[in-house]
Image (cartoon, rainbow, N blue to C red):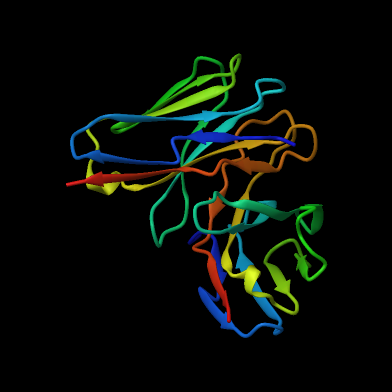
Amino acid sequence: ILNVEQSPQSLHVQEGDSTNFTCSFPSSNFYALHWYRWETAKSPEALFVMTLNGDEKKKGRISATLNTKEGYSYLYIKGSQPEDSATYLCAFPDTSGTYKYIFGTGTRLKVLA
Amino acid sequence: DTGVSQDPRHKITKRGQNVTFRCDPISEHNRLYWYRQTLGQGPEFLTYFQNEAQLEKSRLLSDRFSAERPKGSFSTLEIQRTEQGDSAMYLCASSFFGGQGAKGGTQYFGPGTRLTVL
C-alpha cells in the first residue's frame, strides 16, 4: 500500500517566523509530487507540481524542494503571515495502477498574529 | 469556466436515508475524483473516472456507496442507508490526464459537500 507521510501534523508559529514541513513518499517509480493549500471553508488549492529531482519551485513567500532519490519534499514559508494559516497537503500518484493520487494527512499551520 | 462545483454544500440526514451528491467538473477535464475527508485527516480516495469509465474504487468503500459519470461530464455519488460513520466532507476534484508519459495532472477541487448523519 502506497504511503505518503507528512510531518509535523500541526504547527503553531508566530507572525514573521519562517517554517518548513516535510512530505515523505516512496522513492521508486517517481512520477510527480503535488502540494496543495487548504484554507478553512475553501477548496484545496494547487501550489506546486514537482517532477524532477532537485526541483525548486517558488510562489511568493512559499517555496518547495524535491529529493526523489531519498523520497522527500520540503515546503518552506518565509516570514509567515496569518493568511498562511491552512492545511498543507502533498499528493503522490500510485504509479503501480491507474495513477490515482494518494494524499498525505496534511500539516495544519496556524500563524499567530 | 468557473471551476469545479458541488451540490449541495451541506446535507443533514437521518440514519438509514439515502443521499446523492453532484459534482460538475471543469469541462475540458477527463478525470473526476471523489474523496472523503474527516477531521484531522487528508482527503481519502473513494473512486475516480476517466471520461465515463470508473477506473478504480477504494476497497474501503462499502457497497452502500455508488458513483456514476454517465456522459463523462458531471458525476453523482450516492450513499444508501446512511450511517453516522458516513458523516464527513465529500470532495470532488477534476484533472486532465494526458497519459502515463505526461506530467502534471493537477487536481482542481470543488468546495465539498458536508454530510451530517443524525
Could you say where residue B50 lies in the image, as x and y percent from the top left? 75, 51
* Residue B29 versus residue A57 in the image, above or below: below
The answer to whether residue B19 is visible is yes
Residue at 66 percent of width and 82 percent of height: B15
Q: Residue at the location (62% across, 40% down)? A: B105
Residue A77 seen in the figure: no
Quarter of the picture holding the N terminus of chain A: top right
Q: Is residue B49 above or below residue A101?
A: below
Lateral position of residue B103 relative to residue B1, left or right = right
Rendered location of residue B38, percent (x, y): 55, 59
* Picture residue at 58% right of the left edge, 51% below the top: B43
Residue A35 rendering spot, x and y as whole percentages: 49, 37
Q: Is residue A51 above or below residue B87?
A: above
Q: Is residue A111 left or right of residue B37?
A: left
Q: Quadrant of residue A33?
A: top right
Residue A6 spot, x, y in % from top left: 51, 35
